[in-house]
Image (cartoon, rainbow, N blue to C red):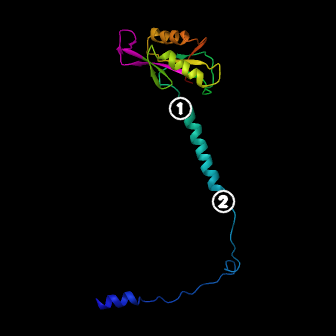
């Protein structure tokens, strides 16, 4: 134990290093660089820009529904001012000719609505933004026509003069 105590008190010393002096890198000529290296910053910004460009079209408002496909329809960019009413198909089975939806549900944005609350929710959304907000109905293509029509009637009953129906564009394979 005494050898260990002695080593701890007096550790062995390494011989001093010999420094080589280079003419180009002498300590006397070295200065502090106060420049910012912009290259990594530009790289990060470009990567973030690419990520946002790829992800932004995938962001949908309202509930995700499988909309009907149409060939010729008016394209309108989503400005975020539109009120989105979604009619979804819950459950169901394949009938003899087409899909038979077991239950349809209505949503205003992502809030579940019933026949009684749909009008209130649409009016509340109308008051939030600037005047003249448009109402877009996204109907699931598996939902019955009657369910989408019923949602249109409920929206019209609260004083919305015009309702837009959403659809996906048909893209031909080349």
Considering every residue shown, the one lying at the far right of the view is 29
User: Which quadrant of the structure image shows residue 38?
Assistant: bottom right
How many C-alpha atoms fall within 10 Å of the one at disc 1: few (<14), some, or many (≥20)?
few
The residue drawn where x is 59% and y is 25% is 128
Q: Is residue 37 left or right of residue 169?
A: right
Q: CA distance from mark 1 to mark 2?
A: 34 Å
- Residue 4: where, in percent of width, then height? 32, 88
x and y percentages locating residue 127 in the rendered image? 59, 22
| Secondary element at tag 2 | loop
Q: Is residue 48 visible?
A: yes
Name the residue beneath numbered marker 1. 58
Which numbered disc flags the more N-terminal residue, 1 or 2? 2
- Residue 107 in the image: state x and y as whole percent: 47, 21
Q: Which residues are magenta?
A: 84-104
Where 124 sits versus 152, above or below? below
Viewer-nearest residue: 174 or 40: 40
Secondary structure beneath dot 1 equals helix
Please give the residue where the numbered disc 2 appears in the rendered image: 37
């Amino acid at each position: 134990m005494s050898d260990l105590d002695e080593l701890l008190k007096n550790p062995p010393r390494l011989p001093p290093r010999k420094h080589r002096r280079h003419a180009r890198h002498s300590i006397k000529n070295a200065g502090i660089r106060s420049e910012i290296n912009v290259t990594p910053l530009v790289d990060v910004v470009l990567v973030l820009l690419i990520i946002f460009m790829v992800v932004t079209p995938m962001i949908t408002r309202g509930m995700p529904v499988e909309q009907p496909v149409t060939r010729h329809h008016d394209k309108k960019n989503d400005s975020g001012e539109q009120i989105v009413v979604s009619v979804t198909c819950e459950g169901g089975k394949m009938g003899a000719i087409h899909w038979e939806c077991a239950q349809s549900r209505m949503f205003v944005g992502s809030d579940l609505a019933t026949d009684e609350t749909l009008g209130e929710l649409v009016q509340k959304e109308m008051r939030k933004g600037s005047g003249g907000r448009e109402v877009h109905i996204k109907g699931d293509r598996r939902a019955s026509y009657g369910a989408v029509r019923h949602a249109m009637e409920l929206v019209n009953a609260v004083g919305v003069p015009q309702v837009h129906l959403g659809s996906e564009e048909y893209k031909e394979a080349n």
